[in-house]
Every structure is written in structure tokens, then in C-alpha cells.
Image (cartoon, grey):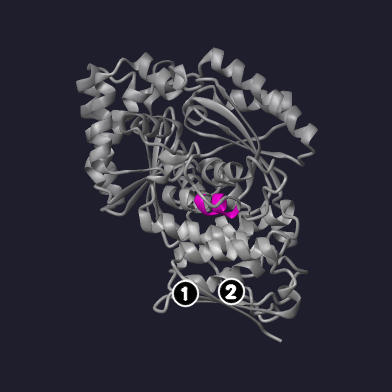
Amino acid sequence: MDGSVSGDEPQDWGPFGRPLFDDPAARALSRVGVVDIGSNSVRLVVFDGAARSPAYFYNEKIMCALGSGVSETGRLNPEGRARALAALKRFQRLAEGMGLPTLTVVATAAVRDALDGPDFCEDVQRETELAIHVIDGREEARLSAQGVLLGWPGSYGLVCDIGGSSMELAEINHGEVGRRVSSDLGPLKLRDIPGGRKGRKEHIKAVMAKLQAEMGEQGNRLFLVGGSWRAIARIDMQRRGYPLHVLHEYRMNAQSVRDTVKFIDKQDLEELRQACGISNARMSLVPYAADVLRRLVQTFKPKDIAISSYGIREGMLYEQMPQKLRDRDPLIEACRFAEAKDARMPGFGKTLYNFIMPLFKSAKDDERRIIKAACLLHDVSWRAHSDYRAEVCFDNATRANLGGLKHFERVFLGLALLHRYRNKREGTRFVELYGLLDEERQLKAEVLGKAMRFGAMLWMSEGAPIGQMTWRPKKRVLELRLSEAAWALFGEVAEARFQSLASSLDAQTDVRLVK
């Protein structure tokens, strides 16, 4: 998180710096189209919105299985090749309709391994004018690692990206991509390994030993990228009865991986597929990927395992970002953009943040950023019907495509925004999700929400002083000092909301006018 400001910027932006999404260099990335031609699928993604943490303006995938049979025939799957060409024609026409200047197209293992890969690229360029960049395994690993950095700036660990025909590893440290390597441990190739499951496991073990020799010890976090890993994570959620069905930032450990692989072995795959909402094509690859994951975890012994929905396509976007944008907090930039686009008074979130922060003097940096995000988002759902506004806020926070949020932080943010519009959290359809927070965090989210609920009553012109709150926890006193302009806003409803906040703090109140 970059909190620095240049000499010509005001110094009151706090640790998050001045918003960057209105910078010309950032806005140049406001709509970027990329196409990933993989061994399983061909996908178009158009990114739009806040440049640091973009929304998915358009996302379409066609399961083509280009790589099916390449290891046996040496050539692309003929049916898959025809489907991929049709998909690329469609994507090129869609890009024209969206006004995109161009599409960046990359192809990975299937096209680079197939004898007719160059012919396929020529056909595509002739019929669509799209130039395909066929990248090698190390470049694929680098782009996937950059996709992870899009969501976790400055992170460290081992990125593992599994596709249909290959599996890549990349090391990241302090926001930089280090050693990287590619292997043939893709499920489509593993299906063709002789000797059944025993032969496959022996092959996986031998290849994994070579990968460890090249990558060295990697005991930090393991980031899993790729559709097969996401399918296994979804099955892990099903096995555990996990309440929040958001794959990005979902966490597992070595024991849960072992338990889930055993669970997959014992289940009827069709019943499991339907229960988890996994496609037929993807489910057929899960048993092979599960064997790879078990050996991967056993070999590298990660302290922590995180699912990343960001991969090669997001890495292609990251490639185009200026460094000052890469260094920014993706959550804060996305929330700033949402406020600028949807709030009734853009900019008030900063005023509200400064007003309520005295309640959270001991907050650590990771807590301060969630408080900041909540203040920026506190008013973006005002268009929702008042009867459902609290639930809409919770839904948006817990299920939106926001980077840089652990699952418990999503629930904390959602609960705070729910309390922005509602005093009580009981009686909602989200009760099972509250369990991802301990009671102390639930109370903090309630206090934050009620503080925003009260502070929003003192809505004035941007930059106008509204007063000051002071929290004295030892004396259990909540002080409020209001300017003359703000005093006129301290009516019956505002006073009731202030008293509700004090009640959650188990505090007495001291309210005074400051002239």
C-alpha cells in the first residue's frame, strides 16, 4: 500500500494517498480487452472501471478443449480448433461493438505444443485480423504471478497456475516475480499417462521433485490459479459447509487439501458436480488435478493456501499499469471509484472517515483500510429501496469483485454497511455468515456502522467542518463537539442515532456546541 504523496499534493490524504483513478495514465486503462487461448477454454475479458481494481465489464468463456489429444496426435483437437476460431470471430466483433482499439490475445500450452499451432494462428489472423502471441511456459508463469499481484500487491509466496496441458510455478517476493518454471502436469496430459492412477501418481511425484529442485524451498503462502483449482476449492467449501461462496481469497491448509482429495475419491462425481455447480468439462479434470494438488502441497509444504481468481488475464492488465498504480491498494482504489461514480456527495467519505476515526485509535493498518473502505462505500447503495438497502449493502460487500479482502474482512465490511442502515443485524438471511467473525469483531462492525449512520446525518458541503467525536474508553464517555453549522443538523433523528452508537459502546454521552 503506497501512502506517499508528491511535493505538490496536499498532505491530508492520510496513509492511502491521493486517488489515482482520475489520473490520465490510470484512466487510459479504463477499458482493456484480453483474450486467453488455453488448452481447455478460450476466454474474452474486458476490464472496466477503477484502473487499479477493475470491474469485469465483459467476461465470456467457450470450452473448446483445444489441447485434448495433443500429446497423442501432436495436433490441436479439430473440433476444438473450429470452435476456437468461431469464438475468436465473435470476440473480435464484440470488441468492435465496444469500441475497443484492439484485443491483446495470448495462447498457451496447447497452441505452443501442437504441430499445427502456427497454422491455427495464421488462420485466426487471416479471418479476424487478430494477432496471437504464443507465449512459453516461463512467460505464462510470469503473467499469472502478475495477476496475483494485482490482488495482493507486495505479496510473497509461490504461485501455481494449472491449465489443461501445463502447470506453471512462479515465485513472488515483495511485489516482484522471481524464479519460474513450467511443467506438463496439466490434467489433459495426465489423462494420457500409461499405467492408470498408479502410473500417473509416479509421474506426478517425479516431475514435482524436479520442480522443487528448480524452485527451491517455498514454505510461504501458496497461491492457486486456474479453473481446476477453483473447482477443488468449491468442493472443499461443500465438504466443510462453508457459508460464503466466494472463491477469491478462499483459504485452505494442507489438512483440508488431504481431506478434500479423499472426499473426491469417495464421491459419485456426477452428484458432486451438480451439488457444487461445476461444469461437466471441468469436473472430468478434477480427479487428475486433485492428485497434483496433493503432491504439490506435500512437496512444498506451504504455511497457507489461497485461491486466486486473478491469473494470466489480470496479469496482462497489470503489465500495462504504471508502477505507481501497481503499488496502490486495490480495495481502496475500487471503493474510491465506486464513491465517485455512485455516491450522492462524492468526497464525503473522506470527511466521514476523519470524523469517526477517534473511535478506533488503536486500529492497526489492516483495520484502518477496512474502515476507510466502509466510509467510501457508505452511500453508494442509496438508490436501493429503503426496505432492502441494508441487505443490498451486505450483499455488495461480501460478493462484489473486490480485491485485497480476506473472507472475514468481507463479512466485517458487509456487517458495518448493514449497520449503516439498520440498528440490528438479527433476522437477516446472512446470519450464518456472521460466524466468520468473532463477537469482538461483530461489535466493532456494529460500532463502525452506527458511527457512519450518525455521521451521515451531519452531511454538509465538501470540506466543511462538522465537529469532532472523542471516545474515552476508560471513563466510558463518548464526547461530541459540533460546529454551529453542524449543530443545526443535530435534530431528533441524529440524536437518536448518536445515542444508539453510545449504547453499542456502553457509554455515557457529552454533547456540546463549539463556537
Question: Who's the residue at 28% across and 49% down the image?
Answer: 302
**Residue 270 location (% of width, % of height):** 38, 14
Image disc number at residue 361: 1
> In what quadrant of the picture does the C terminus appear?
bottom right
| Image vertical order of residue 454 relative to residue 414, above or below | below
Which amino acid type is marked by label 2?
A: Gly
Asked whether, in this view, residue 416 is left or right of residue 433, the answer is right
Query: Upstream in the sequence, badge 2 or badge 1?
Result: 2
User: Label 2 to label 1, Cα distance in Å?
Assistant: 14 Å
Left-right relation of 263 to 114: left
Give how far across and how far down residue 195 sits, in percent.
22, 17
Magenta-span inclusion, residue 416: yes
Residue plotted at (25% across, 21% down): 265
Residue under label 2, please give it. Answer: 14
Q: Residue at x 72, y 65 (%)?
A: 459
Front position in the image: 235 or 496: 496
Which residue does the image show at 47% across and 44% down from the upper left?
Answer: 426
Is residue 303 or residue 478 the one in the foreground?
478
Q: Position of residue 300 (x, y in %)?
A: 26, 46
Tag 1's secondary structure? loop
Amino acid type assigned to the residue bearing label 1 in the image = Lys
Q: Is residue 135 visible?
A: yes
Residue 450: image location, x then y, percent: 55, 59
- Circle 1 residues within 10 Å: few <14, some 14–19, many ≥20: few
Q: Determine whether, in the image, residue 334 is placed left or right of residue 215.
A: right
